[in-house]
Structure formats: structure tokens, C-alpha cells
Image: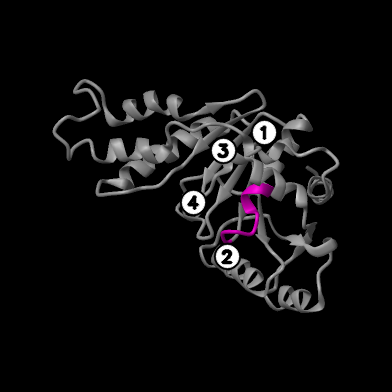
């Protein structure tokens, strides 16, 4: 069974960058095969990893959900929705040398999504055994995990920046995890973009107030900003980049 790591946090805190570097870390450590799942509708994990996306699971879900509502159904009369999903699923999968990637995408309109989500859940359950690790970049609400579409999670990494609001946001996500009774072994906080890699007393106090378990701190790294401006994939950061080195240390604490 794959070891699943979910990364979550509010937008703008560097969550997707950390998720991409985590995937890159696992691949370079030969921990694979790895399945990367972009489950945030507003995420750009593919850009961090440097891959192109042509079709998402959201696109496929739309096709199947609306098949009975349109005149020219994309599903041949002789094919069931299950068989069509099986056939198209391979087109959605992005295959790289060290990892595969699925982009969940977004749902747009009307249709029978409960049924299609069930088909999607079955597909993901079918392939999860092919991987040592699954890394999921989540939206703050963690919709796909809380609804049971994605596999059971072993570790949740909550990512915040060095702001009180950021810490409060991940505090709410941690509360959501408890409310929906996710069976998660480990929930840890990673504070990103800390000046000189240090936390001030006010942020430390807020972390304690929210009842969060701090794994560690990542420094503000000018190299990440420069790569973003140049449109370079973040995973091409040099090995001695401060954020990459610091993240490797934190992942080592988790045995990764």
C-alpha cells in the first residue's frame, strides 16, 4: 500500500513549491515510484515540476457526468461509463521518468458527480498499489480527501507563512481534519519563508495556541523568487539552495 503524504495550506504560502520539492526529494532519494496528485483547483504543481497538462480528471469527470445530458455523447453506445473511464484514465495520467502525475482539475456544471466520483475513487484505488509514495497537493478544504476520493493519508503537512493569519488558517485545517475524523497518523506544521529561518515569539505563541505540532521552519529563499520570475521549474533549484537543504532536514525527521 502506498504511503500517502498530503500537503495543505491557504493560498500564497508556498505550499505548492514545497509539495514539488518534496516530490523531487523522494525521486532523487530513489524512493519511487511516486504518484503526484494536484488536488487543488487553483494549484500549479505542474509548473513547479516543469510538466505540461493537457487533460485533467476534472475534464474527464465533466465528460462522464454530462454524457446523458448532451445530444452527442462522447461515450459510444456500446461502452459503459465505467469502461469509458477506464479507457480515458490512461490519457489523463502524465508519465515522467521518476514519477507519474494526475491533475484533479475543477468541476464546472451540472451532472451526476456522486456516481462519477465513485468511478474516480475506484480508479485511484486500483493504481495506488503501483506506487511507494503518493504526494497530494491539496486545497485548504481538502475536499478530495475528506470525501474519500483519494486514498487514506499517512502524513499531513500543514504549510503556513510567518503570519498570524497563516497560522490561524492551518489551525482551521487541523480542526477540519479532526471534525471529519480522518484516520491520519501524523499531522505536522511547516512554517515557510521565515526571515533567516527563525520564528518570532508572537508566531511561536500562536502556534501553541492553535495546538499545532511544529515540524520545522524553512527560510525565505531569494532563489525561489528568481526562478518564479524567470519561469523556471522550482525543482531545478540548485542542491545547495537554502529552502531545499532545510526541507531535506525536515523530511529526514519523518524518515523520508
Q: Determine whether, in the image, residue 222 is placed left or right of residue 53.
A: right
Residue contact at pointers 1 and 4, CB within 8 angstroms: no
Q: Nearer the viewer, residue 36 or 131?
A: 36
* Residues under numbered marks 2 and 3 in contact, where contact means CB atoms less than 8 Å apart: no
Quote the CA–CA distance across marks 4 and 3.
12 Å
- Residue shown at the point (31%, 40%) measured from the top left: 62
On the question of residue 2 being in view, the answer is: no
Q: What is the number of the mark on residue 173?
A: 2
Q: Name the residue under label 4.
A: 42
- Mark 1 = which residue? 132
87 and 96: which is toward the camera: 96
Badge 3 is on which residue? 46
| Image: 182 above or below 203 | above
The residue segment tinted magenta is 10-18
CA gap, disc 1 and disc 3:
20 Å
Identity of the residue furthest to the front in this view? 230
- Mark 1 or 3, nearer chain start: 3
Which SS class for mark 1? loop
Q: Distance between the residues labelled 1 and 4?
A: 26 Å
Q: Which colour scheme is used?
A: one colour
Amino acid at each position: 500500500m502506498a504511503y500517502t503524504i498530503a500537503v495543505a495550506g491557504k493560498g500564497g504560502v508556498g505550499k505548492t513549491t514545497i509539495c514539488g520539492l518534496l516530490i523531487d526529494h523522494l525521486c532523487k532519494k530513489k524512493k519511487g515510484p511516486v504518484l503526484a496528485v494536484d488536488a487543488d483547483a487553483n494549484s500549479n504543481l505542474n509548473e513547479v515540476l516543469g510538466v505540461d497538462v493537457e487533460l485533467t480528471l476534472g475534464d474527464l469527470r465533466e465528460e462522464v457526468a454530462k454524457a446523458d445530458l448532451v445530444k452527442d455523447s462522447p461515450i459510444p453506445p456500446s461502452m459503459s461509463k465505467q469502461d469509458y473511464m477506464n479507457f480515458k484514465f490512461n490519457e489523463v495520467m502524465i508519465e515522467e521518468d521518476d514519477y507519474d502525475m494526475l491533475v484533479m482539475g475543477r468541476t464546472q456544471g451540472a451532472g451526476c458527480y456522486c456516481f462519477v466520483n465513485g468511478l474516480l475513487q475506484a480508479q485511484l484505488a486500483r493504481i495506488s498499489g503501483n506506487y511507494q509514495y503518493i504526494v497530494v497537493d491539496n486545497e485548504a478544504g481538502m475536499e478530495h480527501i475528506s470525501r474519500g476520493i483519494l486514498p487514506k493519508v499517512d502524513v499531513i503537512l500543514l504549510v503556513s507563512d510567518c503570519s498570524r493569519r497563516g497560522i490561524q488558517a492551518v489551525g482551521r485545517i487541523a480542526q477540519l481534519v479532526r471534525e471529519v475524523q480522518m484516520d491520519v497518523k501524523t499531522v505536522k506544521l511547516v512554517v515557510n519563508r521565515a526571515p533567516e529561518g527563525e520564528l518570532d515569539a508572537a508566531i511561536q505563541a500562536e502556534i501553541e495556541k492553535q495546538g499545532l505540532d511544529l515540524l520545522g521552519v524553512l527560510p525565505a529563499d531569494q532563489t525561489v523568487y528568481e526562478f518564479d520570475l524567470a519561469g523556471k521549474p522550482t525543482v531545478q533549484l540548485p542542491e545547495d539552495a537554502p529552502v531545499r537543504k532545510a526541507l531535506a532536514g525536515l523530511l529526514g525527521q519523518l524518515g523520508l
